[in-house]
Amino acid sequence: MSEYIEVKTNFTDDPDVIVLSSNLILGEESEEIYTSIEEMEEGTAVAQTLAKVEGLKSLIIYGKSIEITRDPNFDWHVIVAEVNSALKDFFL
């Protein structure tokens, strides 16, 4: 794929949950819910790509958004940078 992806980070009231919004479609209109790395590894191509990012506990992928729950032992700036990099590589 040759489209350029832009990702915006939106923090929530929960310090361990963020929502990433994209200009590209990341998933189906219905929610794809992954509650573990093992589920991500068995999921869609985007979920499999993100399963490699350390610190993720769960994902909800829907349309142009991804809700991420992290392991609190990992810093958001590291997770967000790795997710952005993984998504950019995926869409190249």
Image: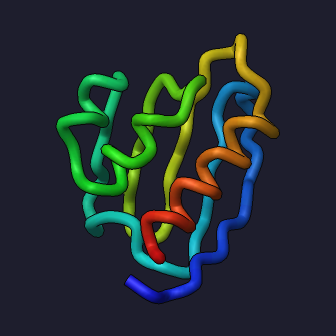
37 w.r.t. 12: above or below: above
Q: Does 22 sit above or below residue 61?
A: below
Q: Nearer the viewer, residue 47 or 12?
A: 47
Viewer-closest of 22 and 77:
77
Q: Left or right: where does residue 86 sit relative to residue 37?
A: right
Q: Position of residue 73 (x, y in %)?
A: 71, 11
Residue drawn at (60%, 65%) of the image: 21
Where is residue 91, by image quadrant?
Answer: bottom left
Q: Examine the rendered structure and indicate whether residue 84 appears above or below residue 38.
A: below
Q: Is residue 47 left or right of residue 2?
A: left
What percent of the width, then of the height, locates residue 62? 38, 60
Farthest residue to the left: give it. Answer: 42
Residue at 78 percent of width and 26 percent of height: 75
Q: Position of residue 83 (x, y in %)?
A: 59, 49
Up the image or down, 28 lies above or below 4; here it is above
Q: Quadrant of the N terminus?
A: bottom left
Q: Residue at x 28, y 48 (%)?
A: 32
Relative image position of residue 24 (x, y in whole percent): 48, 79
Q: Residue at x 27, y 23 (%)?
A: 38
How many marks are shown on the rendered structure?
0
Visual colour scheme = rainbow
